[in-house]
Amino acid sequence: MLQTMSPVGSLMSIPETVDEDLPYFTIDELEAACDYYHEQGYVVIRGLLARDKCSEVMEEFDREARHSRIPILRQKNMRYERNSFDANGLLENPIFNIQDLQSRHFGKFKAAALNLYTDPRVTKVAAGVLGCTPGGESVRLVESMFFEAPAGTWPHQDSYYQDSAANLGGATAIWVALEDIGSRAGRFYVCPGSHRKAPPVLNEGKNNFGTGHDRYRDAILDVARRHELEWRAPFFAAGDVLFWNSLTIHGSLHEPGDSPQSRRSLTGHYLRSSDELLQFHTRVRRQKMTRYKNVEIGMLHDQSEFRNRAARTIAFYFPGLWAVARSVAIKALVASRERRVDEESAAVKAPR
Ligand SMILES: O=C(O)CCC(=O)C(=O)O
Ligand SMILES: [Fe+2]
């Protein structure tokens, strides 16, 4: 076990081998895995995906994307950027929404990733944890990411950014290890049970995304301290998949920057097919829909469309302007929601 510090400064043990970790589950134990997920807010399914299918994603990334100079939307800042690499040559600006990449340039990388996102074993577990009726309703991919270098993602609940409009905690996400993940590769972690123990930190008031994103980060740390949450960073071999609830606090460890270990991985976020996507606890966001191997895929900025590439060009060459426009739009969204809430509570309080 490697000993390290959690985001709140408590001691945390990182399993370095599968034997040092909890036993978790295989797909043959789906019912027990779903029970564990409901209790703990996450579950690991060992060997869910074939190693060679995971390797294909890495190989196609190397072939089509590593040396490309095409600007791509990034998870860290929602900006269009060219690839950037750290001192160890690892991609340090993770890709946001692989399904939006232009097929002409990134078709094979995209297909290799979508093969994993739509793998029947993945969608079966996703449907299981989301409570879809067996053989009935299915799931829809709404967001995806590709990581290579340690990311040091701050602890958060995905719900703050997106969730199911049907109920908070009604979305699930997957962390797919494309390779064996070392203990110093910026391990993904979760706070077990946080989806039940900790109240959702809402995207409103002083913590709203438009003006209070830093306060939101502090609020999550505060919740974790108050509820004395545990920080757990499971061991991952290639093909292992972790599922977590949209209210579960999670993130990834920050490495000092000299760690040569990569953490090549995918994340994907799913809803029940009939649910709508709730963004920023504020609005229902409609997505352009496509299907891949009969699984629904939601897109946001499909780069195969000319108008989205035109928007990308503006965003790339005028990043300041783009960031301001985005922040103004989000602030307006939050303000309109707060106005609506005020009006509704005034209507409730008004004498009849
Ligand atoms: O792996 C990471 O660093 C964070 C991923 C994450 O938070 C997500 O996909 O929601
Ligand atoms: Fe997340």
Image (tube, helix red, strand yellow):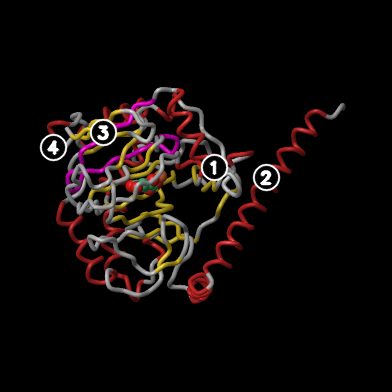
Range shown magenta: 229-248
Judge depth for marks 3 and 4 and give the one in front. Answer: 4
Q: Residue 261 placed where, x, y %? A: 20, 52
> Does mark 2 have its CB less than 8 Å from ligand 2?
no
Residue 250, position as x, y percentages in the image: 38, 38
Task: Please rate how many residues cluster around mark 2, counting C-alpha atoms within 10 Å: few if below 14, some from 14 to 19, many from 20.
Answer: some
Mark 3: give few (<14), some (14-19) or many (20+) Cα within 10 Å: some
The C terminus is located in which quarter?
top right
Please give the residue where the numbered disc 4 appears in the rendered image.
17
**Residue 158 is a magenta residue:** no
Contact (CB < 8 A) between labels 1 and 2? no
Residue under numbered circle 1: 165
Q: Are marks 4 and 1 in contact (CB under 8 Å)?
A: no
Question: Judging from the image, what secondary structure is the residue with disc 3 in?
Answer: helix
Disc 1 residue: CB within 8 Å of ligand 1: no
In the structure shown, which secondary structural element does the residue marked by tag 1 occupy? Answer: loop
User: Residue flagged by tag 1: what amino acid is it?
Assistant: Ala
Asked if the residue at label 4 sits under 8 Å from ligand 1, the reply is no
Earlier-in-chain disc, 2 versus 4: 4
- Residue 138 visible in image: no
